[in-house]
Image (cartoon, helix red, strand yellow):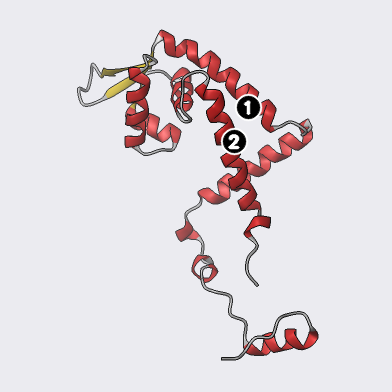
Amino acid sequence: MAFNYKKSITFRLVQAAKAQRARSGSHLMRIGLHPGQELVLKVLADSDGRTMSQLALALGVQPPTVTKMVTRLSSQGYVLRKVSDTDGRLARVFLTDEGRELVVFVDKAWKRLEREAMSGLDDKDRKKLRKLLRQVEKNLSLSVDDDPEHESDLEPDNEEPEVAEKKSASGKGKERSAA
């Protein structure tokens, strides 16, 4: 029997993530940002003066992605890149005053998004959902190479002809040829 992906939790998770990204994008566009840029501002608001590699690590993205985001934010006047005084190879990224002001609007956009996303869920459900999503994130963060079942999961399900015949005889499955 084919896997019904539309009824899977991972499909629902993907659909929810798409909806979240679209809604987040519309809120961020109102303040002149693209999705992902707000995270750079938030990370710098928490710890200003990070290097590009520190930002990449904090954001969970590749260095070229950070470079592109920082370049755009810099051209908008929200961040400033400064070469390190101690190591000329390192550039540190700082929020400008305009960037700090924008973080306030980012927070408002996130609060609104949170309110919209969690509408209809009580506090108990929200806490449970947060806990469950952390577990899913942890599960998916594990290396595929560490899963001994990984290779067998990727093989097609092939029932023995005997099993298929028994299912067919009991009316529980479709007939299948032994060929």
What residue do we see at 63% from left, 22% from top?
Answer: 111
Q: Secondary structure at mark 2?
A: helix
**Residue 84 percent across, percent down from the top left:** 25, 19
Mark earlier in primary sequence (1, 2): 2
**Residue 28 percent across, percent down from the top left:** 52, 24
What residue do we see at 48% from left, 30% from top?
Answer: 35
Q: Secondary structure at mark 1?
A: helix
Outermost residue, top direction?
A: 97
The CA distance from mark 1 to mark 2 is 8 Å
Q: How many marks?
A: 2
- In this rendering, would 86 be left or right of 106? left
What residue do we see at 54% from left, 15% from top?
Answer: 105
Where's the N terminus, which quadrant?
A: bottom right
Where's the C terminus, which quadrant?
A: bottom right
Q: Is residue 147 above or below residue 169?
A: above
Task: Tell me if mark 1 has few (under 14), some (14-19) or many (20+) residues whose alpha carbon lies within 10 angstroms of its own.
Answer: some
Report which residue position mark 1 lands on.
113
Say what amino acid the circle numbered 2 marks. Gln
**Residue 39 percent across, percent down from the top left:** 48, 27
| Residue 20 tag number | 2
| Residue 21 tag number | none
- In this rendering, would 168 be left or right of 114? right
Which residue occupies the foreground of this view, 130 or 13? 13
What residue do we see at 60% from left, 38% from top?
Answer: 19
Which residue occupies the foreground of this view, 35 or 30? 30
- In this rendering, would 141 be left or right of 119? left
In which quarter of the view is residue 119 placed? top right
**Residue 171 percent across, percent down from the top left:** 79, 83
In which quarter of the view is residue 79 placed? top left
Q: Are marks 1 and 2 in contact (CB under 8 Å)?
A: yes
Say what amino acid the circle numbered 1 marks. Leu
Task: Tell me if mark 2 has few (under 14), some (14-19) or many (20+) residues whose alpha carbon lies within 10 angstroms of its own.
Answer: some
